[in-house]
Amino acid sequence: MDFKEQIIRLYEEKPADYTSAHRELFNQFMDQLNKGVIRSAEKQEGTWIVNSWVKMGILIGFRMGSLAEMGWSSSKSFFDKDTLPEKQVFLKDQIRIVPGGTSIRNGCYIAPGVGIMPPAFINVGAYVDSGTLVDSHALVGSCAQIGKDVHLSAGAMIGGVLEPIGSCPVIIEDGVFVGGNTGIYEGVIVRRRAVIASGTILTASTPVYDAVNDNYLPKEAGKAVTLPENAVVVPGSRPLKSNHEFSVYCPIIIKYRDEKTEMSVILEQDLRQSLD
Ligand SMILES: CC(C)(COP(=O)(O)OP(=O)(O)OC[C@H]1O[C@@H](n2cnc3c(N)ncnc32)[C@H](O)[C@@H]1OP(=O)(O)O)[C@@H](O)C(=O)NCCC(=O)NCCS
């Protein structure tokens, strides 16, 4: 039985007692998540595919773990499932972690060259690629997939999607700029180099209007939208269908990235780590 099948079988079996072999299997699984060898979602021929079995593996950790003292700070105690400690990061990992309250849960991949400002929280199953900056008070939720050279500004909330098991996590592709105080949740996919203006909130229920092409982005029932490449999305509103006296929130693609946008979101390379 291959590794994936072993994880699926253990997830489905739900044994009353977990053995040391189960623990060993789970530790191998976490090791592969830490190295970015396995991912909860991956792009195949332009389409994002959810690896439900990876989510199953993470959930095994919650089931199998028992509450234990985490031994992290000398002045404060922490208690969590003993299967899900903090991720240990070393200088050789070449991740810049500014001191002050950041927490990175074990079982996530963070590429060399990522910068993390305090306090940030990066949850299990997340994947953060090289050159990305995770600013203060930013959340990278469980299983969220963050591409290369992404800017997650202060207070950007990238929601976690661990359940239902087959649901798509939030995906932020390469070069996306996520402005301050934004929220991207429930399987929203943001394609390459899109710009999410500060204060924009996107959920599976949020319709997005494309003012350039004069249409709403296509959306399957219960599924979140996919924001197109280079879209610049700002907070907006639309009249309530049942009563035009009122408006509801509706983010708007105000334009597609142009020179003016480049100036607005220009990033300071000195703040990023050169790995050359
Ligand atoms: C989206 C953003 C990058 C502006 O992009 P831009 O390409 O420079 O946009 P422009 O100034 O050309 O504006 C284009 C249109 O969008 C509107 N617009 C721009 N930003 C907007 C916003 N945040 N909310 C609502 N409307 C906005 C403008 O009013 C303009 O509309 P108009 O053509 O009807 O007048 C900017 O608003 C933004 O959110 N920056 C991020 C700030 C941030 O979070 N920084 C974090 C690091 S500190």
Image (cartoon, rainbow, N blue to C red):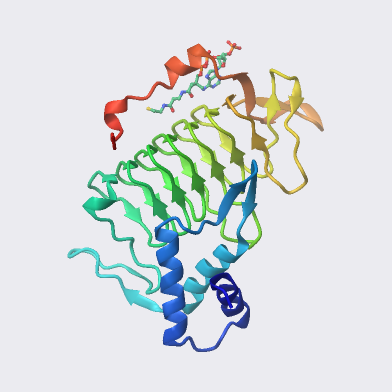
Quadrant containing the N terminus is bottom right
Q: Residue at x 39, y 41 (%)?
A: 130
Quadrant containing the C terminus is top left
Name, please, the residue furthest toward the top.
Answer: 260
Name, please, the residue furthest toward the right.
Answer: 242
Q: Residue at x 40, y 43 (%)?
A: 138
Percent from the top left, x then y, of residue 73? 21, 63
Q: Quadrant of residue 264?
A: top left
Percent from the top left, x then y, of residue 134? 38, 40
Q: Quadrant of residue 230?
A: top right
Q: Is residue 75 left or right of residue 168?
A: left
Q: Is residue 20 left or right of residue 186?
A: left
Q: Is residue 82 above or below residue 54?
A: below
Percent from the top left, x then y, of residue 55? 56, 63
Residue 33 in sight from this viewpoint: yes
Q: Is residue 27 above or below residue 242?
A: below
Residue 65 in sight from this viewpoint: no
Percent from the top left, x then y, of residue 249? 65, 31
Q: Is residue 191 above or below residue 166?
A: above
Q: Residue at x 52, y 56 (%)?
A: 39
Name, please, the residue furthest toward the left.
Answer: 74
Q: Quadrant of residue 251?
A: top right
